[in-house]
Image: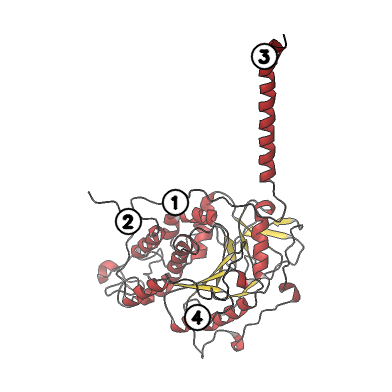
Amino acid sequence: MKDAGLRRLLPLLLSVLLVALILIALSSKRMLSFRVEGEETPLVLEQEEVVLDSKFKPEFPNQTVLSISLEERNKLPPRNSNLFPNLAKDHIKIVLYVHNRPQYLKVVVQSLSAVEGIGETLLVVSHDGYYKEMDEIVQGIKFCQVKQIFAPYSPHLFPDSFPGVEPGDCHDKENAAEKKCNGNPDQYGNHRSPKIVSLKHHWWWMMNTVWDGLPETKGYTGHILFIEEDHYVLPNAYRNIQLLTRMKPWKCPDCYAANLAPSDVNSKGEGWETLIAEKMGNVGYAWNRTVWRKIHAKAKNFCTFDDYNWDITMWATIFPSWGTTVYSLRGPRRSAAHFGKCGLHQGQDSRNACIDNGVVSVDVDDADKIPNINSNWPLHVVKKQGGYQAGFKGWGGWGDERDRKLCLSFAHMYHFVEAPSI
């Protein structure tokens, strides 16, 4: 009788046990997925899907001796690893991209040397080609690990061929058919200027190289902070960007990036006790690999939009193509400042410093020397986005098919696999 009763109860007992196990599993899963405010969700690196035109075959100009030597330098390991042998577990890598304004670079390097926590991370300096004085300034950095990379296809490295000025190229508004010259004009009838197109080429080459080409960053899943040679970095910048990227997933789930400064480069911030979500700015911006992959998937849009500015290209065509407002999280006080009066490719020398009285005047208050981001602050969302948006046709300067193909080649250079011959 007892055995018969147990047999009748056995299915019920098994069902109860199964339900209990399921509840325990679900409870454990919830416990594992719970995160304390202020802690960034652990990143799980899944197999990345690289979206590119499989029919496109990248082509690059024949390199000069200098171009080849720079590519070899790109393979060198970071310097100062003997001084800073270990990077912090939660470090955010920094990329400083520079052109040919040594007076500016000296100021930025000096500001970086005073940043709290700078010795915990890797600084990658991306050069637009090669300028000796710029190289020497970076060689003198001793406050953190430093890796230098040099864009090997910068136009000034090719004095007699594309992407520099090639014999037979059209100039200004020349008619190609009448002059029997080479080139495609932009939407305003102007032919390419190597100095102008260098800006967009360098930024795009740098992004592709940093995210997909360097062993120091290729498998990195965190955020990377990007600054330029005319961005003065305040002492609390690194700690603040750590806080912003850590709280972004739960404080502003719709934010794609974090910024050290307002999108209005002339603004010092509101000074409120709030966090700000607004249009992504171009001063001290940080995003992760997920966002980069979304940008990279729009390579054709980026490379064919007729504007020589990388940031306007992003605002007018890439971000709008995502189908949602692209917000960036920042604090109410800037932690980086744009300075200077020189144009990007004007260059400078001792007689033309482009900085008032040879110095930079950036107010650094006591509040700028310590982290001043509070996760308990409410979030203010700036819904009305100003500046360049979808529908803007671009300022031109990017109409030549050779530039567009080189740009697309940069997008493919770390992903192209030559089909085996039969």
Residue located beneath label 1 in the image: 50
Name the spot of residue 116 as percent of width and height, x first. Answer: 67, 73
Is 366 left or right of 210, judged from the image as shown?
right
Q: Mark 2 or mark 4: name the one nearer the start of the chain.
A: 2
**Residue in the image at 51% along x and 48% along y:** 46
Q: Mark 3 or mark 4: name the one nearer the start of the chain.
A: 3
Q: Amino acid type of disc 3?
A: Arg
- Circle on res. 57: 2
Mark 1 crowdedness (10 Å alpha carbons): few <14, some 14-19, many ≥20? few
Closer-to-camera residue (350/2): 2
- Asked if residue 123 can be seen in this view, the reply is yes
In which image quadrant can residue 245 be found? bottom right
Q: Amino acid type of disc 2?
A: Lys
Is 109 left or right of 419, judged from the image as shown?
right
Name the spot of residue 184 as percent of width and height, x first. Answer: 33, 65
Q: Is residue 74 above or below residue 407?
A: below
> Which of label 3 and label 4 is nearer to you?
3
- Asked if residue 193 can be seen in this view, the reply is no
Question: CA gap, disc 4 to disc 1?
Answer: 35 Å
Question: CA gap, disc 2 to disc 4?
Answer: 36 Å
Residue located beneath label 4 in the image: 139
Question: CA gap, disc 2 to disc 3?
Answer: 70 Å
Disc 3 secondary structure class: helix
Q: Amino acid type of disc 1?
A: Val
> Which of label 4 and label 1 is nearer to you?
4
Are the residues flagged by discs 3 and 4 in contact, CB closer than 8 Å?
no
Residue located beneath label 3 in the image: 7
